[in-house]
């Protein structure tokens, strides 16, 4: 066995020098890591074919799948009421329209595109009970002919928490992004957090405001201004354009094309000007991440070989015990944070009730006074002017309160953030002090000043709800009401609209802060659990291989140590020393999953 491996070393070194990713795959095979081997091979194939991933990101029900279908000119991806499962779908160029899925057994299975919902929808594959690891859809669209691949990601913010986790897990493989936002609701904190998490590796962002045909000009203007401002702050770069589109209208050939031609042109420009660089960067990024993981595997396996077998077994038992305790600690953290969330929610609710009780009479008095000054000679004009006055009065009182409340809520937020950081850091410290070296690779301690994983952002900066244009039926009714001098009907509806504006906007602080609390908590738990599972897998694999080597006696251990030394030497000569700044286990789902390979 030793001679065979020794004979292979020159060939392996040549492979590493000629094609680092394939060389890394061979090294992974030498080290017994089938998942890394498959991921490296998949990434090598993707880069050799010049394919790069443009992920479509956004909240659940933004119409991401419809946007991609419209870009393809084909209703290829399923759309509907329920969200996708935890499986991102890669859409790539093909000479025929087809699809395939890969299961845990590791084999590709061709399916009809019409049957995709059976594998990627929560309705027909709830929580991925079918065990789908990858989905690829082939489209004849010329937009994809030069290597660009679309990735339809599960939507953020649905009731299925695995969907958000799956989208975050795909982050390491994203090369460019289409961020799909809306006007109602506007861009969310979760969408901004996702954009922020990929900004260090993605420089090409296309921002699309979908369903533009369902909103007024003013709603779109306000939503675009808000989204642009928030994204520029989060990404730390200018947002030059937000494309207004109606993907469904484009598919149905109905309505105005709006910015659709410009969106397509931007994607074509991305392929021509940035495609090669995106492919190269994807390879370099994956190479660095996978090499770091192999360094970790070598270190863990060497430690398992040099210590007594009984000690290794005790360490594994301690590892499992520590992980079990960690899961209990996570639940304790959840209870503590839930209590904080309830307390904050109650406080914000009480403050809003006080504001309504004190301010609403003043709002009504001002509105009544201004309503009397509006001419009543034409019903439709009276309605339009009355609604505008309602907006003006509501904003006059609500905005100053929101600005004051923002300051108060921010102080409360920072207090809870400090508590959150303290709880999280205590938990991480217990893991680091557990005597298990793998847990020293836990994420960096939480910054008490930063606290939550999500930056402070409030979505109430503009009053997003405006009166919709009157329908022909309403217009005719208003004309009749004007003729009959029945203006009290319109006034009553304006009063209702005023109260709605005040009620809606006065809840914005409460909902925004609570969303950030819950989202930050979820992100931290996902990070820690991913690491725990990765540590378990690597440690148990190392123990298994150490047992096999020890079963062969001293020569088996010596051969195994020599194999590790040779592999580490090749890694260091080609890939450099181990990069500790990228903790193992936090890199997300594997390229193998992205390409449909078995992890």
Image: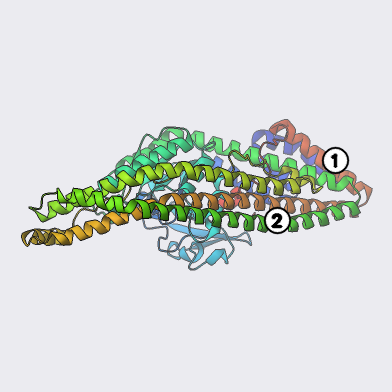
Q: Decide which of 490, 121 is in the foreground and name it.
A: 490
Residue at label 2? 329
Q: Residue at the spot x=44%, y=56% of the render?
A: 60
Q: Residue at the spot x=60%, y=54% of the render?
A: 337
Residue 284 at x, y percent in the picture: 60, 36
* Label 2 neighbour load within 10 Å: few <14, some 14-19, many 20+: some
Q: Residue at the spot x=89%, y=52% of the render?
A: 311
- Residue 318 versus residue 198 in the image, above or below: below
In this rendering, does residue 541 appear at all? yes
- Earlier-in-chain disc, 1 versus 2: 2
Residue at label 1? 562
310 displayed left or right of 424:
right
Q: Which element carries disc 1, helix, strand or loop?
A: helix
Q: Which element carries disc 2, helix, strand or loop?
A: helix
Residue 21 at x, y percent in the picture: 64, 40
Task: Give how far apart the Cα atoms at labels 1 and 2 are.
Answer: 40 Å
Q: Decide which of 260, 487 is in the foreground and name it.
A: 487
- Residue 295 versus residue 543 in the image, above or below: above
56 displayed left or right of 301:
left
456 displayed left or right of 9:
left
């Amino acid at each position: 066995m030793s001679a065979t491996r020794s004979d292979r070393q020159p060939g392996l070194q040549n492979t590493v020098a000629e094609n680092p990713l394939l060389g890394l795959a061979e090294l992974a095979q030498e080290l017994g890591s089938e998942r890394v081997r498959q991921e490296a091979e998949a990434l090598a194939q993707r880069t050799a074919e010049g394919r790069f991933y443009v992920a479509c990101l956004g909240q659940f029900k933004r119409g991401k799948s419809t946007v991609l279908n419209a870009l393809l000119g084909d209703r290829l991806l399923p759309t509907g009421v329920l969200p996708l499962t935890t499986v991102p779908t890669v859409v790539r160029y093909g000479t025929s329209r087809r699809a395939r899925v890969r299961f845990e057994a590791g084999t590709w299975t061709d399916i009809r595109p019409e049957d995709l919902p059976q594998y990627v929808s929560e309705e027909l594959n709830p929580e991925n009970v079918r065990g789908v690891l990858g989905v690829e859809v082939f489209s004849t669209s010329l937009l994809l002919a030069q290597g660009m691949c679309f990735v339809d990601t599960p939507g953020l913010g649905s009731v299925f928490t695995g969907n958000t986790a799956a989208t975050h897990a795909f982050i390491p493989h994203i090369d460019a992004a289409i961020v799909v936002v809306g006007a109602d609701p506007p861009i969310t904190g979760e969408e901004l957090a996702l954009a922020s998490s990929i900004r260090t590796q993605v420089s090409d962002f296309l921002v699309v405001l979908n369903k533009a045909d369902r909103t007024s000009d003013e709603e779109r203007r306000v939503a675009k201004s808000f989204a642009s401002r928030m994204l520029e702050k989060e990404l730390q770069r200018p947002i030059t354009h937000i494309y207004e589109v109606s993907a469904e209208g484009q598919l149905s050939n109905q309505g105005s094309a709006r910015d659709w031609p410009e969106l397509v042109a931007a994607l074509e420009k991305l392929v021509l000007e940035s495609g090669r660089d995106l492919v190269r960067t994807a390879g370099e990024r994956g190479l660095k991440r996978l090499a770091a993981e192999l360094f970790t595997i070598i270190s863990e396996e060497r430690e398992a070989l040099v210590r007594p077998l009984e000690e290794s077994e005790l360490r594994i038992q301690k590892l499992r015990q520590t992980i079990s305790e960690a899961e209990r600690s996570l639940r304790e953290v959840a209870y503590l944070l839930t209590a904080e969330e309830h307390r904050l929610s109650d406080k914000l609710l009480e403050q809003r009730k006080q504001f309504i009780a004190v301010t609403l009479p003043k709002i009504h008095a001002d509105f009544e006074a201004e309503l009397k000054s509006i001419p009543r000679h034409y019903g439709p004009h009276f309605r339009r002017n009355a609604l505008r006055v309602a907006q003006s009065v509501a904003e006059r009182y609500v905005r100053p309160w929101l600005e004051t409340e923002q300051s108060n809520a921010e102080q409360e937020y920072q207090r809870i953030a400090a508590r959150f950081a303290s709880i999280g850091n205590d938990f991480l410290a217990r893991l680091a002090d557990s005597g298990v070296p793998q847990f020293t690779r836990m994420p960096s301690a939480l910054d008490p000043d930063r606290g939550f994983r999500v930056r402070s952002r409030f979505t109430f900066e503009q009053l997003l709800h405006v009166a919709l244009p009157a329908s022909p039926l309403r217009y005719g009714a208003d004309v009749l009401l004007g003729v009959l001098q029945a203006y009290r009907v319109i006034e009553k509806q304006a009063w209702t609209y005023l109260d709605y504006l005040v009620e809606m906007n006065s809840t914005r602080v409460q909902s925004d802060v609570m969303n950030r609390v819950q989202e930050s908590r979820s992100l931290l738990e996902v990070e820690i659990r991913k690491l725990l599972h990765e540590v378990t897998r690597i440690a148990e694999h190392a123990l298994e291989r150490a047992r096999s080597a020890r079963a062969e006696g001293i020569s088996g251990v010596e051969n195994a140590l020599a194999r590790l030394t040779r592999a580490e030497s090749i890694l260091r000569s080609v890939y450099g020393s181990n990069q500790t700044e990228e903790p193992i286990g936090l890199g997300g789902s594997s390229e193998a999953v992205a390409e449909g390979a078995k992890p």
